[in-house]
């Protein structure tokens, strides 16, 4: 089968579109014919090892231990292992290969069935592949770490990317009043996905406005932790999902220390793929409360271009890899 592989860290130029052995499912696994995948910053970090921690975490100190890339996937089950009970051949599924060897940039994957859920019936494979990692990160950030409640004032910084476009819609589905922060060219997009208020970060710094929010999800960009803290209501919660490396390290190193005084909580989300959260997303998607925003599509052979585009940091929603023409 065709797949994307890499044997050294580097730019997307090191990605090769090549032939690899088609996997066969182990006892607890399902074999999925991939129709679409999507690109995440996660893939960029694995490709470039730009964050040293990625190497230390066992991905490979000098070169990647695992040559396969890609987490998000949507496709159709071709075969099931003998202990796999949840699905049957022919079922359409979506899922996240993180923690299962990655490899969604390929014609087939094999992984434990717990990595998948039935594809939302109303979504194309392209749309479904856009959901797992970004959608579940936004969900776990808002619901689990952020303790989101109806009528709260919630701000999403970086509202126009993969995580942000899901976060705006998920926060609305919880009944929050949502403020989206994005650049000028994405203001209309933020309104179209339901944001009640939109702040153009090129014109206004929300941390200086005096307005305060019950929950802030930081998906992209950078503000200091003290600036975020200032923009929280007295019992407000800050959840760092991503952004600049400084934003991530400040939240990890200083968050719990800064939460010790006063009622504000400064923390982060480290999203974990969970089948029940895929099902939660499926329900939101089928109810029409969340609609994936797709910026661009690339064929599997041009995955390097897709990853390069994502890596530039200005994707508007999700970047999808179309593996088979079944959208
Ligand atoms: N914690 C976790 O478990 C977890 C899981 C998934 C992802 N992440 C992290 O979350 C972050 C976001 O992921 P993503 O998929 O949303 O990335 P993405 O799709 O690549 O984000 C691109 C978007 O970010 C916006 N942006 C860039 N600079 C900005 C700024 N200064 N202020 C506000 N928006 C800005 C861009 O809009 P403009 O072009 O208009 O600026 C663009 O729409 C990444 O750092 C990723 O590593 C973390």
Image (spheres, grey):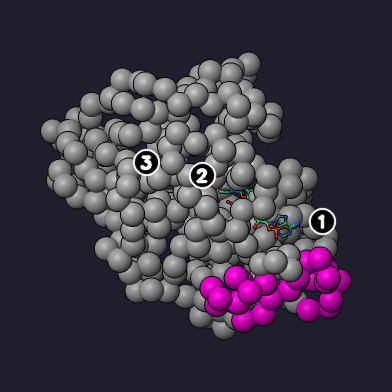
At label 2, counting other C-alpha atoms closer than 10 Å, the crowd grade (few under 14, some 14-19, many 20 or more) is many
Callout 3: helix, strand or loop?
A: loop
Q: Examine the rendering and report whether any part of residue 292 can be seen.
A: yes
- Answer with left or right where residue 81 lies relative to residue 252: left
The image quarter containing residue 40 is top right
Q: Examine the rendering and report whether any part of residue 116 can be seen.
A: no
**Does the residue at mark 2 contact the one at mark 1 (Cβ under 8 Å)?**
no
Q: Residue at x 39, y 53 (%)?
A: 126
What label does residue 224 carry, if any? Answer: 1
What label does residue 39 carry, if any? Answer: 2
What label does residue 323 carry, if any? Answer: 3
Q: Reply yes or no: does residue 164 show up in magenta.
A: no
Nearer the observer: mark 2 or 1; the answer is: 2
Q: Which residues are magenta?
A: 187-211
- Answer with left or right where residue 223 lies relative to residue 238: right
Q: CA distance from mark 2 to mark 1?
A: 28 Å
Quadrant of the frame with the N terminus: top left
Compare marks 2 and 1 and give the one earlier in the sequence.
Answer: 2
Q: CA distance from mark 3 to mark 2?
A: 13 Å
């Amino acid at each position: 089968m065709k797949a994307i592989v890499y044997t050294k860290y580097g730019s997307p130029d090191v990605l090769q579109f090549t032939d690899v052995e088609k996997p066969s499912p182990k006892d607890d696994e399902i074999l999925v014919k991939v129709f679409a995948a999507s690109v995440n910053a996660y893939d960029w970090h694995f490709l470039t090892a730009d964050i040293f921690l990625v190497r230390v975490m066992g991905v490979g100190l000098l070169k990647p231990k695992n040559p396969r890339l890609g987490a998000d996937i949507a496709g159709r089950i071709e075969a099931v292992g003998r202990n796999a009970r949840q699905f049957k051949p022919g079922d359409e599924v979506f899922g996240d290969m993180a923690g299962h060897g990655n490899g969604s940039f390929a014609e087939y994957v094999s992984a434990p069935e717990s990595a998948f859920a039935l594809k939302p019936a109303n979504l194309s494979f392209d749309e479904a592949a856009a959901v797992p990692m970004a959608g579940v990160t936004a969900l776990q950030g808002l619901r689990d770490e952020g303790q989101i409640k109806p009528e709260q004032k919630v701000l999403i910084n970086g509202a126009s990317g993969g995580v942000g476009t899901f976060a705006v819609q998920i926060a609305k589905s919880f009944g929050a009043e949502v403020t989206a922060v994005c650049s000028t060219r994405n203001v209309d997009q933020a309104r179209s996905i339901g944001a009640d208020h939109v702040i153009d970060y090129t014109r206004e710094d929300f941390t200086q406005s005096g307005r305060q929010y019950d929950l802030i999800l930081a998906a992209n960009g950078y503000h200091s932790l003290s600036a975020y803290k200032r923009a929280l209501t007295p019992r407000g919660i800050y959840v760092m999902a991503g952004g600049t490396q400084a934003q991530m390290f400040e939240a990890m190193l200083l968050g719990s220390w800064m939460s010790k005084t006063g009622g504000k909580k400064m923390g982060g989300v480290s999203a974990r793929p969970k089948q029940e959260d895929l099902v939660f997303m499926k329900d939101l998607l089928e109810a029409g409360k969340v609609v994936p925003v797709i910026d661009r599509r690339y064929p599997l052979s041009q995955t390097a271009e897709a990853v390069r585009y994502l890596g530039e940091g200005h994707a508007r929603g999700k970047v999808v890899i179309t593996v088979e023409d079944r959208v």
